[in-house]
């Protein structure tokens, strides 16, 4: 376990970076926010499940991050976060989104965190490469985004000290009703080497161990983890519906979006 050395914090207060991040952009953002609070923090990568109980103390600060999937928290991430014991720890709630909309993601994540025993103190949505349509948000989060994430971490702790309760009024987090799910299937190409890295990396166990070219469509959440992890670039989004949606989507969401943060009033 890492010792907290951050100057902004008392000695017994630990900083936790907790994230569900199939294609690793959320990870970058959460770690940047945490590094704005303290030089050292404890990393909990829950992308492939909770391997042990995560229990915080009331004095601790957590940065909890997920990607926006169809404008919501990925259900599997919601399940995993609700098993964490927040025990009154302050939480900075964050999401990565692929230059479209994060819609309900932050407000839903805030509610999940409250139910898990956290006290949300701030929230932020950060633009990142769209893992389903990589033309969107290309190259992001960039150095500038990560610098903003670090500043946001620092500001969140400062604000929570000076406001009366140090608690975010979660009603100020914008939320929209998500519009629907993009139909997408991930398949293996002939470059598949049967190494089974995708099978081992899949958060939902959707890829067959005996034949990694077989994906269980009912289990696959199209999170792009297998695409990210495959050393042979043999996993791809496929299908006519995907191709049609992709063209429309990329055209519609091309204009650059910005990061959005909410701090206590
Ligand atoms: C299934 C799926 C649904 C997505 N839905 C949205 C969305 O509604 N809005 C958006 O802006 N980006 C959306 N994205 C893009 C992700 O939010 C973005 O790529 C994020 O950085 C992924 O995080 P990760 O790299 O930690 O996996 C979606 C991506 C996937 C794979």
Image (tube, grey):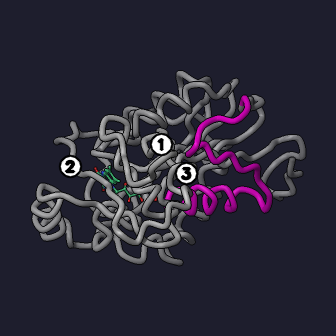
Question: Of the residues tagged 1 and 3, which is closer to the observer?
Answer: 3
Residue at the spot 56% in from the left edge and 57% down from the top edge: 197
Instruction: Provide the residue designation for mark 1.
Output: 265
Label 2 neighbourhood size at 10 Å, few (<14), some (14-19), many (20+)? some
Q: Position of residue 151 (x, y in %)?
A: 59, 64
Residue at the spot 20% in from the left edge and 49% down from the top edge: 182
> Looking at the image, which is closer to me, 216 or 127?
216
Instruction: Provide the residue designation for mark 3.
Output: 201
Q: Give the SS element for disc 1.
A: loop
Q: Quadrant of ligand 1?
A: bottom left
| In the displayed structure image, the side of residue 139 where residue 72 appears, left or right | left
Q: Position of residue 167 (x, y in %)?
A: 57, 33
Of callouts 1 and 3, which one flags the residue occurring earlier in the amino acid sequence? 3
Q: Position of residue 79 (x, y in %)?
A: 50, 28
Q: Which residues are magenta?
A: 25-53
Respond yes or no on whether mark 2 lies under 8 Å from ligand 1: yes
Instruction: Provide the residue designation for mark 2.
Output: 182
Question: Of the residues tagged 1 and 2, which is closer to the observer?
Answer: 2
Q: Position of residue 194 (x, y in %)?
A: 50, 60
């Amino acid at each position: 376990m890492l010792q907290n050395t951050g100057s902004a914090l008392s000695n017994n207060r630990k900083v936790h970076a907790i994230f569900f991040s199939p294609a690793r952009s959320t990870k970058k953002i959460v770690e940047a926010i945490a590094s704005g609070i303290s030089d050292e923090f404890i990393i909990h990568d829950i992308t492939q499940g909770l391997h042990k109980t995560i229990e915080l103390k009331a004095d601790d600060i957590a940065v909890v991050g997920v990607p926006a999937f169809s404008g919501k928290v990925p259900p599997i991430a919601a399940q995993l976060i609700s098993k964490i014991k927040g025990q009154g720890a302050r939480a900075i709630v964050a999401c990565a989104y692929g230059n479209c909309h994060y819609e309900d993601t932050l407000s839903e994540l805030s509610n999940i965190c409250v139910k898990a025993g956290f006290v949300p103190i701030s929230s932020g949505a950060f633009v990142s490469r769209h893992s389903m349509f990589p033309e969107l948000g290309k190259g992001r989060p960039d150095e500038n985004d990560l610098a903003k994430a670090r500043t946001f971490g620092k500001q969140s702790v400062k604000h929570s000290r000076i406001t009366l309760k140090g608690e975010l009024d979660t009603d100020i987090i914008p939320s929209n009703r998500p519009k629907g799910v993009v139909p997408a299937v991930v398949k293996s190409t002939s470059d598949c080497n049967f190494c089974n890295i995708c099978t081992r990396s899949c958060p939902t166990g959707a890829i067959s161990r005996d034949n990694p070219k077989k994906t269980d469509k009912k289990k696959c959440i199209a999170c792009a983890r297998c695409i990210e992890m495959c050393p042979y670039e043999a996993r791809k989004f496929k299908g006519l519906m995907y191709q049609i949606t992709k063209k429309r989507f990329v055209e519609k969401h091309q204009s650059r979006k910005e990061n959005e943060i909410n701090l206590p009033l």
